[in-house]
Image: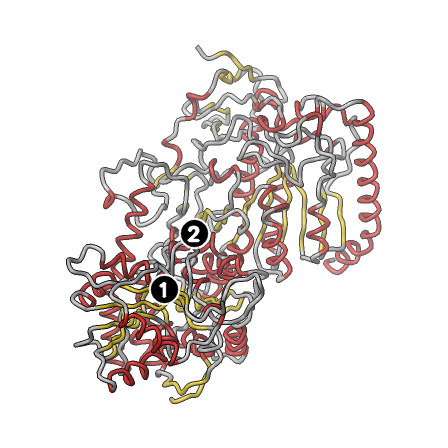
Amino acid sequence: MQKVMMGNHALSWGALLSRAEVIAAYPITPQTEVVELLSNMCADGSLKAEFIKVESEHSAMAASMGASAAGARTFTATSAQGLALMHEVLHWATGARLPIVMGNINRAMAPPWTIWTEQTDSIAQRDTGWIQIYTSSIQEILDSVIQAYKVAEQIYIPAMVVLDSFVLSHTNENCEVPDQDKVDAYLPRFENAYKLDTDKPAAFGGLTGPDWYYELRYKIERDIQKALLLFEETGKEFEEMFGRYYGLIETYKLDDADVVLVTSASIASTARPVIDQMRSEGHKVGLIRIRVFRPFPSELLRKLLSGRKKVLVVDRNISFGMSGAFYAEVKAALYNVKGRPPMWGYIAGLGGRDVPMDVIKGMIEQTMKEDHPTQDIIWIGVKR
Amino acid sequence: MMSEEIKWEKESDMPLMAMSLGRMTVNKTGSWRNLRPVIDKEKCNKCGICWKFCPDVSIEIDSEDYPVVILDFCKGCGICAVECPKDAIGMVKEA
Amino acid sequence: MRYTIPEQEIMCAGHKACQGCGATLAMRYALKALGPKTMLTLPACCWSVIDGPFPYSSVGVPLFHTAFETAAAVASGIRAGLDMRGDTETNVVAWAGDGGTFDIGIQALSGTVERNDNVIYVCYDNEAYMNTGVQRSSATPWGAVTSTTPPRHFKQERKKDMMAIMAAHGIPYTASASVAYAEDLIRKVNKAKQIPGSKFLHIIAPCPPGWRSSPEITIQLARLVVQTHMFPLYEIYEGHYYKLSMDPKKKPLTEYLKPQGRFRHLTEEQVAEIDRQVDERYARLKEQAERSKPWFEAKKEKKD
């Protein structure tokens, strides 16, 4: 079925098709449409789920944990302040090994108040052990929710599907809504092997000393690393069933590229016609869109970026006191590679500042002009 | 549920997350006490109040309905002695 | 039944509670009433430690340890998850101390009971943040010394009236209980099990190290706190109809206060002030119970 829908509704449709059973969510601009549509879907019976109208995001994630621990497939959504408020409980969900899937609309952090897009909110959660998928189209948002459950439930690691505020959340695009039967075949019913069970009573999360806590952390890391392969496997399976492939990254005109732009989300979408334009001008430029940020696809990036002349990374986020997060991590992945290319790190688009084609072109041109970067962070478009 | 001590050598011996596999009856809290309750069967009227008020589930009822202190676990709090309506329980110093 | 409370033990021995712990008795009794088809959510509190370290447990039912503020919210989630999987029978119980109920957990609690989610919320109240070293909570009574309210600056705020706050949410059933009155406590848990919607139980649980009292008098204190009218036992139906569980002839307040080191610094005037507050509150409670009598009468007639 073809349907024109906004990014937020794509999250709702993803949850519906995944047969989410419990939804606990609190409204925040620009996420509200996600939960409003889900409420309607519950009300008209198209989604057989219980919608808990919690009183805060902290409780939204807490209630989600309870539902998942009880064995139900659980979904929630939030943004910025709400995601930040959940922080403690995000850690808890990971440690409790609960495969919750959450949509996060990337919105800049306050103060001052803002509703426009920036990735710092989800970047600030990258240490919590959640899988992170950065989407760049409405179709991808819908499909990613389904794929996220498939990966998360195999390794008992929670996952967030993130999308740009307004640019994606409130933009309408044509979308292929997969058949429920096919989704059911792709994503079977959730059976939590570690659920709360009165036939097998157990206490979860009891005090653990230094002698064994370390090993439990090791298990989390070992398992989140499995997602690297799982995304490619489940992506191939998705392609076979639905005709669309979703892996760890997406490349565009990369093969013989000397200069590679690495970025994510909607900036990557805008970058494609820039690549086309520069190619037509004779420049060998290419694009990598990082889709799965956690676990970070280090090996794949090493493979694709080794031997390039120059790499530039564009971050729509900042880790204050350091740099953009994608830049820091791409650099780190390439560090031990002999003959690694010099890398430029650009900050653009914070707080929803537009990043149009000419700005992206400017960044690539700056990189092409310089032999090596002279700054750790290059701020683009600051009025000074 | 087992009540034996659980020993691991390595990570793969452990469950996926911190989930309990045994009961706390492995923990013999009897070693905590300084005082031990002694029940005088002559005075005891088998009312069961001592059993009722024990926070440590350390009083059992035997086949003749007399209370028996489970010394492995009794922490010697003395509640049973204080609550016994027949003054049938005295607290004596542990050796 | 040989005794006045069910004999089956669900909680086991070997747990980490201090000698004479009231909180442990609360759990032991509650579980006897709840039965094995029960799931607990447990935020940071004494019981987080009492239950035992990984990989052991002493409660004998599924238990989800959770973050401090979240007991009620997790309970709401478990309820929804179980319901969706076809299990509407298992009791879902949030088990929290006064910290996780009156203070840091109050928002989630208010949310859960405002939605009238079908869970039982039990607060075992030892009147301070005992697990972290006896710091004051809003449940600490006026006049008490804690590690953050030393004798020169003892707590001068009155104990937050959690029962009234729960009643204000209009929930089907709210009740106070004491570990000294095990039969009454168990009756109330059984009552809560049968009523759909949100139920709140407030159990006074003496803490020997925190109250600076001798472990052996825990039950005596839990009895005296009721008999001196300082912690009356009553039920509130539908947030509006009050019923006293007992109306004991008042014992002198000093009998309750004297054996506790946390009140040792109080002057006669200060004790008199506490007494005045106790009497004032008790009188109001009796008025509420009197006013509610017709409602209970009408219910009884309907039954007969």
Q: Nearer the viewer, mark 1 or mark 2?
A: 1
Residue A298, percent from left and from top: 24, 61
Q: Residues within 10 Å of mark 1 (few under 14, many from 20)?
A: many
Residue C98, percent from left and from top: 61, 41
Task: Please name the residue shown 21% across and 78% down the image.
Answer: A284
Could you say which quadrant of the image residue C265 lies in? Answer: top right
The chain that hosts pointer 2 is: A
Residue C72, percent from left and from top: 56, 53
Residue B33 as seen in the image, left or right of residue B83: left
The vertical placement of C64 against C222, above or below, is below
Residue A63 as seen in the image, left or right of residue C217: left
Task: Please name the residue shown 50% across and 66% down the image.
Answer: A108
Amino acid at circle 1: Gln
Q: How crowded is mark 2: few (under 14 residues within 10 Å), some or many (20 or more)?
A: many
On-image quarter of the N terminus of chain A: bottom left
Count the labels in the image: 2
Residue C296, percent from left and from top: 77, 54
Q: Which residue lies furthest to the bottom in this view?
A: A2
Mark 2 = which residue? A92
Task: Please name the residue shown 49% across and 50% down the image.
Answer: C38
Mark 1 = which residue? A132
Is residue C101 or residue B6 the one in the foreground?
A: C101
